[in-house]
Image (tube, grey):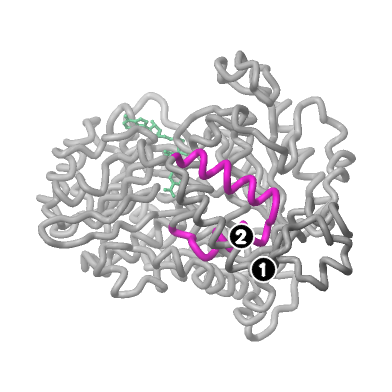
Amino acid sequence: MSGQDLLTNAAVNKSTAFTTEERERLGLRGLLPPHVSTQDEQLDRVLENLRRKSDDIEKYVFLTALQDRNERLFYRAVMENISEVMPLIYTPTVGQACREFAHIFRRPRGFYITPDDRGDIRRILDNWSEGDVRVVVVTDGERILGLGDLGANGMGIPIGKLALYVACAGIHPKQCLPVMLDVGTGNASLRADPLYLGVPKPRLEGDDYITLVDEFVAAIQDKYPKALIQFEDFLTPNAYTLLNRFRDHVLCFNDDIQGTAAVTLAGIMASTRISGVPFKDLRIMFLGAGSAATGIADLTAAALQVEGLSESTARQRLWFVDIDGLVTSRRQTIAAHSKPYAHDHEPMGFLDAISHVKPHILIGATGAPGLFNEAVVRCMSELNERPGIFALSNPTSRAECTAQHAYTWSDGRAIFVSGSPFAPVEFNGRTFTPGQGNNAYIFPGIGLGAITADAKMIPEELFLVAARSLSEQVSEADLAAGSLFPPLDDILKVSWKIAADVALKAKELGLSQASLPDDIHAKIRQHSYSPVY
Ligand code: NAD
C-alpha cells in the first residue's frame, strides 16, 4: 500500500507521523504538511479537540471519525484516557448515539444481516475481508440499554462493545466483527423516520426469526470456527431462548445476562469485605425481574452452592420484586426464568417486602429511574449498618437512585454501585468514589480467556472464575474510597488476569482446544494489541 491509499486506510494510517524516510518510500511526499509529528503530539491534538467540545454526542462523533481515520491513534486516546473516554464511546453516551444513529451516521462499520439475506448469509459473509475474526458482537436492537427497541440504530452497541474488547483486553481490532441482525423494528416512530437506515418493517418473529439466527450462527461458525459470539441487547425472552439454544455447543454468551451477572457478583463478593456479612449468609433483593436480574440471581445461586448451600437454600436467599410487587409462587403467571425465585409468600409491595425479607443488598435492574427513593434507602439503612445499594439501570438518567441520594439518605453508610458512571460525591467531609458495575470489567477478560484457550463453549464455571478473579483484584484502598471495583485505569491488567484465570479453568474443565503454555498470563500480555506506532 502506498500514497493516498495509505492515508485512507485507518488500520495503517499514521498521518502526520509518517517519517521523512517513509514519506519518500511510500509515495507520500507532498500529501502531508511538512512537520513530522510524534504520536504524542497527535494525541495532544486529539485530546485538545475532544475537550473543546461541550456536547457528548459531538465528542462521540469526533471519536468515531478518528477511529475511521487513524485506528491506532483512536485506541491510544481510549486506552490512555479510559475513564474519560469510555463513557463517551460506551454507556451512557452510546445510548444517545444509538437514538440518533441514523441522523449522525457518517460511514458504515460492521456487518448488517436482514431477512432478505436468508439463504445467503454464509455467501455474503465473504464480503467481510478480514480472515481471522475472533470476536463477534451481535444485536437485533430490540432492547438497547434501558432504551427499548431502537432497531438498526442499535448498531452503536456492537461497535462500542468491540472497541472495549480492544481497549480493555488488547484484542486486535481486525479480529473484531460488529453485527446488526436487522429483523425490522417495533418502533413505529423509527419506521416513519425518513432518515432511518434499517429495515422499516415490523419485526420478524417466531420460527422465521429463530431460523435466521440459526443461519447466522452457522455461517459464523463455518467462516470463523474459532470466533466467540457475544449476544447483546436482545429482548429478555429472545435472549434466553438464544442462549439456551446455543450455549452447550457454540462458543457464545449473552452479556446482559452473564456478563452483568459476573460483574455484579464480583461487586457482591467485594461488598462483604466492607459489610462483614459472610457471603454465604447474604440475603439479596432484586427490583426488576428481567434478564439482568435473573442472570445475577442464577450466578449468585451457583456461587452460594460452591460455598456449600443446597440449590434450594441458595435460591431462598434471593428475592425478586417487579412492577407488580414481590414475585411469589402464588401468582397466576410467572416467567420461566423467574420461577426459581418465586417463593411461597403472601403478595406485597416493594417497601413492605424489604421490611419482611430484610435484605443485605438491594439490586435495581428495572430501566426505571428513581425507584430507590428516600423511604427505600432509609429502610435499608435501618436494617443494615452498611446497606448494599446497587442501582444498575443504564444510562445514568435511568439509575434507580443517584450516588448523592444513596450516600445522603444512608448517612454515608451505603455501599453504592451504579450501572453508569457517577462523579465522586462529597458527604459530611468525606469523598466517596462510587464504583461502576460496568460489564467492561468482565466481558473483555472472559472473551480473551475463551479465545486464548480456544474454548469449545463458556459454561457457568468460567463466569464464576471471572467474578472471583475480578473481586480479588479490588484493593483495600478501592474499598476505602467506596468502590467495589478496581480503578478503570487498570482495566487492561485486570482483563489479562481474568483472561488467564478463565483460560486455565477452561483447560481444567477439558474445554480448551489450544495448547496453553505454563505462563498463560505472559502469553496473553505478549499478544496484546498495542496502539503505539
Ligand atoms: P428487562 O426489560 O428484561 O427487565 C426489566 C425488569 O424491570 C422487568 O422485570 C420489569 O417488570 C421490571 N420493572 C420495570 N419497571 C419497574 C417498576 N417501576 N417497578 C418494578 N419493576 C419494574 O431488562 P434487563 O435486561 O433486565 O435490564 C434492566 C436494566 O438493567 C436496564 O436499564 C439495563 O441498562 C440495566 N443493565 C445494567 C447492567 C450493568 O450495570 N452492568 C448490565 C445489563 C443491564
Q: Considering the image in quadrants, where does the N terminus appear?
A: bottom right
Tell me which residue sits at (88%, 59%) in the image. 2
Tell me which residue sits at (87%, 57%) in the image. 3
| Ligand 1 visible in quadrant | top left
Lateral position of residue 360 relative to residue 448, left or right: left
Dominant SS of magenta comes to helix
Residue most extreme to the bottom: 518
Lateral position of residue 107 relative to residue 60, left or right: right
Q: Residues within 10 Å of mark 1 (few under 14, many from 20)?
A: some
Residue 332 locus on image (x, y percent): 38, 24
Magenta-colored span: 55-83
Amino acid at the residue labelled 2: Tyr
Residue 431 locus on image (x, y percent): 21, 61
Residue 77 is covered by the magenta coloring: yes
Q: Considering the image in quadrants, where does the C terminus appear?
A: bottom right
Q: Quadrant of residue 208?
A: top right
Lateral position of residue 392 relative to residue 149, left or right: left
**For mark 1, what is the residue?**
529
**For mark 2, what is the residue?**
75
Residue 513 locus on image (x, y percent): 75, 70
Tell me: residue 212, above or below residue 10. Answer: above
Q: Secondary structure at mark 1?
A: loop
The answer to whether any part of residue 511 appears in the image is: no
Q: Earlier in the sequence, mark 1 or mark 2?
A: 2
Amino acid at the residue labelled 1: Tyr
Is disc 1 in contact with disc 2, using a CB cutoff of under 8 Å? yes
* Inter-mark Cα distance, 1 to 2: 10 Å
Q: Nearer the viewer, mark 1 or mark 2?
A: 2
Q: Quadrant of residue 185?
A: top right
Tell me which residue sits at (75%, 73%) in the image. 514
Residue 252 locus on image (x, y percent): 65, 52
